[in-house]
Amino acid sequence: MHTCTTKGQEKSIHVPTSAFAKEVEKVEGGEAINKCIQCGICTASCVVANATDLYRPRRMIQKIILGLREEVLSSDQSWLCLNCRMCEERCQEGVSPAEIFLAVRTIAAREGHVPRVFKEAVKTVLEDGWMLKDAYTDFQEDEREDLGLNPELHMNNEFVGKLRKRYFERKKAAEESGS
Amino acid sequence: MDMLLYRGCTTPVRLPAYEAATIAVLEKLGVNVIELKDTNCCGAQYVESMDRMAFASMSGRILALAEREEKDILAICGACSGSLKTNKHFLDHDIRARDEVNSLLAEEGLKYSGKVRVRHLLQVLAEDIGFDKIERAVVKPYNGIKMAAHYGCHVTRPYEIVHVDDPENPTILDRLVEAVGGQAVDYPGKTRCCGGPMLAMDEDVATTIGLDKIDNVTKAGADGIVTACVFCDIQLTQVQFGGGTSDRQKIPVLPITQFLGPALGLDEDMLGVELNKIDPHSVIDCCGVSQ
Ligand code: SF4
Ligand code: SF4
């Protein structure tokens, strides 16, 4: 990163310094990455960073800016973000680490780097239309009836089938044919 | 006032008491709650992480269903209200994305045009009904019991999209507590996440984050916690049962409508109080008794 401070050069601080940063910049949510000044307020306000040494949002943004593409995409780090948006609320530069990590996830997903729990959850949603079909048993139906609630949840699974075809299977086919 | 309840995936299965209490309280306050049928998951967290357009389509379909009914949506889960509002914002500003979503919706005669609003429960209580009306409806006021408010990240952030409350200093839950005779207590880290979304990836970290909040609430002297999101409610309850927590004094966690209900004279059975994992009677028995 440049650390120039003279007026005429100020803008160059904000220029993304790697091809990967430019790639992230183009994804919905990643637009503001080049504005990060690496101040670390995001890490300081992050509950995950507070709870474990394994997660540092500022450092992850730095790695993107430095162009460490493979390292960032293959690591679990972006998937550890809670998307709680505390960092986004606090960042003085208008950067949303939360949005950037979502953008990184979508790039990682395109290249097949998806943690197992996410893969399974998406598979469930795209089959059943919702998350908890298997968890919804007679027992819960009775609870709902006792509360005067409708035990029939009327969830639709046809629409997700169309989404699977349009957004997921096509991608997979493209991957497999190597295009 | 009619509102369409979008239940989402988790509330109806894991916390039906929240759904029941919300319907009972809102009907008591003059809102006619109608269930939105034939819905799907809003796409939060999982589909959201994989494909922007698939996510927008899942929420877009729910919004289009409400449009067909010509009524606003009531969302009671932070993730659902966050997703619906974020995707509404996206589809209202990106015409190409809207056309793409509509091309699939057209197959079942639906169309998204952005006509209905998404209202989180807190907006309905604070703005559509109003604190005055709630205060006037109290028949058994609380005796000043101390309650800590947990708002839920996606309920209040980002403000530019969700428009619920000041994200750095939210007050709606606190004012609701006080409207029915409780005392709202502040605590450090009030706007921090409950840790719930971390359960999928790292349960220990999720528990550390949740228990940190419980500790802060307890130190502030609260007798209970009120919530406005199903995931937060479940997470803040569940962390109190993990390993190494057996000698802890458990603090009851109540969805806000379950807390309001008794003060409005609603019967416990309608509020699903029996189903709470941490018995909330130490809280709800404090209404209608003198201070
Ligand atoms: S708070 Fe904002 S500017 Fe500072 S390091 Fe984090 S993302 Fe960059
Ligand atoms: S959104 Fe992610 S990076 Fe930002 S504070 Fe929350 S967990 Fe940390």
Image: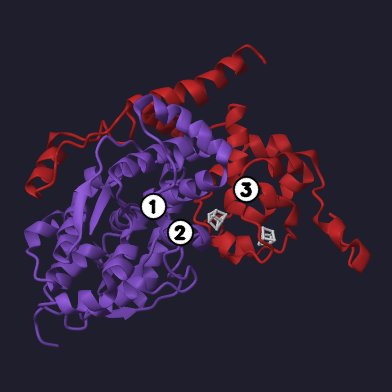
Chain colours: A red, B purple
Could you give the CA–CA distance between mark 2 and mark 1, rounded to whole angstroms? Answer: 8 Å
Q: How many marks?
A: 3
- List the residue tagged with mark 3: A100
The residue labelled by disc 2 is B162
Tell me if residue A78 can be seen.
Answer: yes
Mark 2 is surrounded, within 10 Å at the Cα level, by few (under 14), some (14 to 19) or many (20 or more) other residues, namely: many
Could you tell me how far apart the alpha carbons at marks 3 and 1 are, in whole angstroms?
Answer: 21 Å
SS class, disc 1: helix
> Which three-letter amino acid code belongs to the residue tagged 1?
Ser
Residue B288 spot, x, y in % from top left: 9, 79
Where the C terminus of chain A falls, by quadrant? top right
Q: Quadrant of the N terminus of chain A?
A: bottom right
Q: Are marks 2 and 1 in contact (CB under 8 Å)?
A: yes
How far from the left and from the top, in percent, is residue B92? 51, 47
Circle 1 residue: B81
The subunit letter for the residue under badge 3 reads: A
- Decide if residue B246 is on the left or right side of residue B207: left
